Image (cartoon, grey):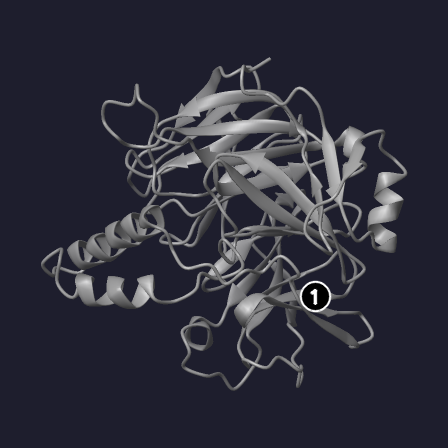
Amino acid sequence: MDKRSLSERDICTKFITPAVAALLALTAACVEEEDAGEAIFTPEVIGTAALPLSESQEVALLADERTACVVDSYEIQVRCVNVEGAVVGVFGREGEGPGEFGGLGDLTRGEDGTVGVHDGDLGRFTIFEPSGSHVSEVMVAADYYEPFRSFGTVLSGVSLDIFAMLGGGNSGPLMTRFDVNVATGEILREEASPSGSWDVACGEVIYGIPDRGEGWVFMACEGHLIFVRDTGDATVLRAPTYLAELPDERDVARREEFFMSFNRMNGFPASQGVEELLEEYRATPKDYRLGTEHQLVDAANRYWVATQRDTHDWSYLDVYENAEYVGSVKVRDRLRGFDLLGSTLVALVERQVGADDADGIPDRALDWYGLADLGLGR
């Protein structure tokens, strides 16, 4: 086992909701006091794999729960590794031919053990074996399409209203769900997301995903979440763990690189206007969520969201069930992305810079966690 694996699992709580109580009944973990209204679940690390540097935060845990794939943005490749830390396959390059990418976007797992790559630049979805063998490809007609975490004969996802997400307003739904036939590209389902006069004080709904039924979960501003049932009834709550923390210097350094990369891509001097943007960023509390893509609904219809809370030695994923906060899953290091299947959680992280890191750049890795003993698995 990795030397930084936890020797025992702990669940810390001070205020136990019915959903938390049900989970505690499934575990033999100790119970200690934490912040009011909060339960901390700390799973055991069961494997780890080192990764090269990349700007992408995509990760897909494959059907065997032992293999996971990430995007190497600098080489325009997909890299698949296993729980023992071995490289299973590295594939792809820039281009428009079979197995090539105009730009790497979203990763998603196939139910048969494959991995799917959605290339937004080419409007194409390609399926690979994790070794890199090319299986098939299909064009996806929806603009700004983001597929869900898994696919079979049908690829499901949402198409975004980018103009509305950037604050330009919209005359229709914020997003539309599309189901696409993986073999033919035929659109089998097109369904607008619900909208409503939800009582959110700050007034801004950002993004949403469907649940396992006919409901949706929406992210909103300042730590608010909106759970919409298939009946149209909605529950609005503010995440009990939302702290409105200001960015730290590591956050600022990452944002500075983002601004400079954006300038370079658009032909401007790298530093143009960056200091003014960073001044505003430093003074603005961080969002509750890590990013719009860092959320999922598991097989038990629980909603998981990666948060920006702390993200130093530890990071946190908040879990909700039936529109009720269950608790937070605590993982080591600085979380950049995650995926979940069955009883396994995989976390894409940046390690803390140590004394032996001569380059001063955080190393990247994947950590596998076992959830079965916490009652958060299947």
Please give the name of the residue rendered at 40% of the width and 73% of the height, measured from the top-left corner: 166
Q: Helix, strand, or loop for circle 1?
A: strand
Q: In this view, does 269 lie to the left or right of 308?
A: left
Please give the name of the residue rendered at 77% of the width and 49% of the height, measured from the top-left corner: 14
- Is residue 116 visible to the viewer in this orientation of the structure? no
Q: Taking 114 as reference, is 218 above or below it? A: below
State how many labels appear. 1
Under mark 1, the amino acid is Trp
Please give the name of the residue rendered at 58% of the width and 31% of the height, measured from the top-left corner: 114
Residue 374 figure quarter:
top right
Decide: few, some or many residues near mark 1? Use Cα within 10 Å; few <14, some 14-19, many ≥20: many
Viewer-side residue, 171 vs 100: 171
- Residue located beneath label 1 in the image: 216
Q: Position of residue 208 (x, y in %)?
A: 60, 65
Please give the name of the residue rendered at 48% of the width and 62% of the height, measured from the top-left corner: 287
Q: Where is residue 123 in the image (x, y as percent from the top left)?
A: 42, 54
Viewer-side residue, 170 vs 285: 285
| Quarter in which the C terminus is drawn | top right
Q: Taking 320 as reference, is 108 above or below it? A: above
Q: Where is residue 155 in the image (x, y as percent from the top left)?
A: 61, 50
